[in-house]
Amino acid sequence: MEHKIIVDSCCDITPDMKKQFNITSVPLTMLLGTKEFIDDSSLDIADFMQQMKDCTEKVGSAAPSPILYQEALKDSESAFVITLSSKLSGSYSSAVMGKSFVKEADTSKTHILDSKSASAGETLIAIKLHQLLAEGNPKELVIGAIKKFIDNIKTYFVLENYDNLQKNGRIGKLKGKLVQMLGIKLIMGSDGDGNIALYEKPRGARQVIGKMLSLIEKSGKNTEGENLVISHCNNPDLAEQLSSEIKRLFRFSDIFVVPTGGLSSLYADDKGVVMAF
């Protein structure tokens, strides 16, 4: 039986990785004031980033419509859908509704997974899911294993720019300006249930790398044979430095360094970096 892996576009993945892991992406919509941008392969990320920088209005995003999920699921023998955290977006609800729209829907054919994460976290889940399926495991075993995997994922991100958090009301303007003036880098991440929590407040790139490495060590996770994903928004230098230090200190099987897509770029903003393991 052929298994289809469907993700929403918050999953940061390159075209080559899409082919390698047989992944289909369903686009979200980004909102810059009254302008709408579809997060698909036609999006000009550089132009979008410039318009985002110039935008003085509220910025945000909208989940894919259920119809888009219905189209992605149509005619699939077996499908797994991975969405960004249901605590952060309506993408999971849209996927559930899209599944119900499929004619003669067989509930055993499609399994929808709330990543309880975003960005690099979704990418990590998609890679793990592909590996489990490629090994020929029974679907019931795959579902149990991937749910356990999701429950144990660690996702952290660090921002260079806090403009969008101010524009969408997630951080006050005064607080955002003070953070940037003092050179503080906020390391935030999933609290394990899909919400965002603050973990560290380093200053400068070297402290960022040190704190990220410390978070891996403190996690207590066995890294041998596992994967790690780093997403970055126009910050390959920091992403590669972090990757190099992780390779030196830990025993991950593979480290994937990928650029952020449209939605992740909207929230990570210029120079933002996301790490998931």
Image (spheres, grey):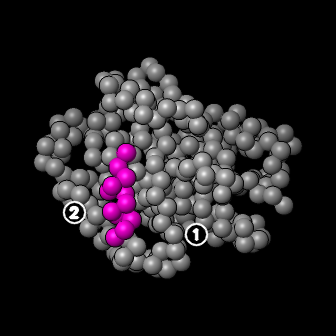
Q: Residue at x 53, y 77 (%)?
A: 225
Judged left or right of residue 275, residue 163 is left
**Considering the numbered disc 1 on the image, is that residue within a helix, a strand or a loop?**
helix
Instruction: List x then y, in percent, for residue 73.
Output: 75, 44
Q: Is residue 235 magenta?
A: yes
Magenta segment range? 234-245
**Considering the numbered disc 2 on the image, is that residue within a helix, a strand or a loop?**
helix
Instruction: List x then y, in percent, for residue 29.
Output: 53, 32
Q: Mark on residue 207?
A: 2
Q: Amino acid at mark 2?
A: Gln
Q: Which residue is mark 1?
A: 148
Q: Looking at the image, which residue sits at the far top? A: 34
Q: Mark on residue 38?
A: none
Q: Amino acid at mark 1?
A: Lys
Q: Is residue 190 magenta?
A: no
Q: Is residue 8 above or below residue 155?
A: above
* The N terminus - image quarter: bottom right
Density class for disc 2 (Cα within 10 Å; few <14, some 14-19, many ≥20) is few
